[in-house]
Image (tube, rainbow, N blue to C red):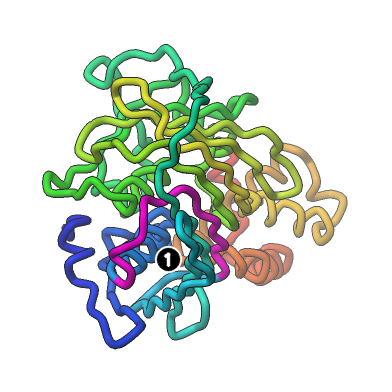
Amino acid sequence: MTSLSALLASMSRDGDQFSISPTEDWGQGRTLYGGITLALAAHAVRRAFPELPPMRSAQAAFTGPASGPLTIHPAVVSAGKSSAFVGVDSVTAAGVALRATFCYGVARNSAFRHVDIPMPDVARPAQCGPFFPTEFTPQFAVQFEARLAGKHAPLAGIDDPDLLAWIRHRDQDVANDEAGLIALADATPPSATLMFTEASPISTMTWSMEFLGTDYRNDGWHLIRSKGEDVGDGYCSQAMNVWDEHGRPLIAARQSVSMEGYPCRRVEAYLCRSLPVFFKIPSLFSCICKHIFAVSKKRKHNFATHNLVAKSLLRNLLYGKNYAPDIICICK
């Protein structure tokens, strides 16, 4: 396992650009997860412009899969006496994977102070069970300790997508900087996964966040809350907050997430259009769908090819090939 501190230390510089080849244990499916992608960009900016004041906000668009070697291009957009904006593109061989803008600002004297982001009343980490279900554990989860602080974990099949989890880095040498906090802040899956009953592809499209202070430590427990406020049409709009273990709010954020439909249901939709009426007996139809999907999944097809597999197997089924006996067995 490559720790966060070791990963950041491996970043090399060539003029105005930075290069890094993240290991698979920071991945999520075919790409890096969004938190580490943005954290690497933030680290490159801090190395390129070490004189920048603390980070105050970030806006990120995840425009493509971040897989393989990354080249990171930070550039100052504007800079004044007290604040600066820096733009970053993270590029793979396939094109731009991330386009982000970071805002940095010095602390200013002010007569006003108001904080109204109370941490939810949850059990302490030592009293909480594991967070990730066995069948829904991304590769990067090995980098963190995670405890279920809310009532429900992903794949619970509930109607209220309100996710609560305690998270902390396993890396004992993680730095107390924005890169470490960004990586941790995205270590939980989207809140809509609480509505799922089976694993299905998800992808963060955009992420905007505000840093609510500069006094934080990345080596302790952090409580993350992600609440889905609008879920539908294959997308989830969620509000996010991060607190340290003492209840101090550190991040207020929003994410827009795309969600794939259940692949088995895609097969069902195809079969509804293709099967003769006499095959649409509910119990038999369900068995046919599950069987076709199981065969396709066993052959490790991508989700996009399930309908093609369904078409091929359906033809065999209708013309008396070797699938009818299997379906009879499943029915039994």
Please tell me which residue lies in front, 323 or 179: 179
Quadrant location of residue 48? Answer: bottom left
Q: Which residue is mark 1?
A: 31
The residue located at (76%, 54%) in the rendering is 269
Quadrant location of residue 195? Answer: top right
The residue located at (45%, 60%) in the rendering is 298
Please tell me which residue lies in front, 288 or 319: 288
> Is residue 270 visible from the viewing direction of this image?
yes
Vertical order, 329 against 15 (above or below): above
Mark 1, Cα crowd under 10 Å, few <14 / some 14-19 / many 20+, is some
On the image, the x and y values in percent for residue 26 come to 30, 59
> Is residue 320 visible from the viewing direction of this image?
no
As helix, strand or loop, the secondary structure at mark 1 comes to strand
**Magenta range:** 48-63
Outermost residue, right side: 277
| Left or right: 298 in relation to 220 | right
On the image, the x and y values in percent for residue 243 come to 38, 29
Q: Quadrant of the N terminus?
A: bottom left
The residue located at (52%, 77%) in the rendering is 96
Please tell me which residue lies in front, 48 or 96: 48
On the image, the x and y values in percent for residue 180 come to 29, 49
| Left or right: 278 in relation to 304 | right
Q: Quadrant of the C terminus?
A: top right
| Left or right: 267 in relation to 91 | right
On the image, the x and y values in percent for residue 101 come to 52, 63
Residue 52 lies within the magenta run: yes
Residue 278 lies within the magenta run: no
**Amino acid type indicated by mark 1:** Thr
The residue located at (40%, 42%) in the rendering is 107
Outermost residue, left side: 172
